[in-house]
Amino acid sequence: MTWTVRVHAAAAKQLSTIPPDRRQRILDDIVAFEEDPFRGLVKPLKGKTHKGHYRKVSGRYRIIFKPIHATHTVEVLAVLLRNEGTYK
């Protein structure tokens, strides 16, 4: 079954600031969510504030998303450069 992918406005704004070559790789990974959002380097985030959220590695960037199993929807919440403050 295919999944529907929704990119939040904050994530779209973050994507627009990423260099075009890296942005394309991230967009390819986001499109791949339609087939299986849990394929690849995907892990659940820990902590009370991140309950139900996952992250996918895309080069030096992390795609933060929330799957909604009832409607087969993936909400892309953020696209962040991996550093010390990424998951705070």
Image: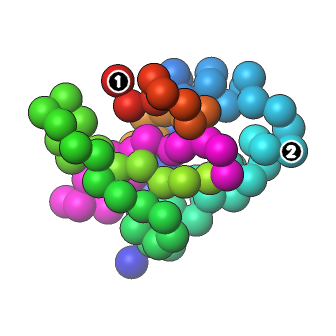
Q: Label 2 amino acid?
A: Asp
Q: Give the quarter of the image for residue 79.
A: top right
Rendered location of residue 41, percent (x, y): 49, 64
Please name which of the two marks, 2 or 1, marks the residue nearer to the observer. Answer: 1
Does residue 52 appear in this view? Answer: yes
Q: Give the quarter of the image for residue 85.
A: top left
Q: Give the quarter of the image for residue 53.
A: top left
Q: The C terminus is located in which quarter?
A: top left
Does residue 37 appear in this view? Answer: no
Secondary structure of the residue carrying numbered label 2? helix
Residue at the spot 54% in from the left edge and 54% down from the top edge: 57
Q: Is residue 56 above or below residue 20?
A: below
Q: Pointer 1: residues within 10 angstroms few (<14), some, or many (20+)?
A: few
Q: The N terminus is located in which quarter?
A: bottom left
The question of residue 51 being in magenta is answered with no
Which residue in the structure is indicated by mark 2? 21
Q: Are marks 2 and 1 in contact (CB under 8 Å)?
A: no
Image: magenta residue range: 59-74
Residue at the spot 24% in from the left edge and 36% down from the top edge: 50
Q: Main secondary structure of the magenta part?
A: strand
Question: For residue 88, which numbered disc appears in the image?
Answer: 1
Using the numbered discs, state the Cα–Cα distance from disc 2 to disc 1 in whole angstroms: 27 Å
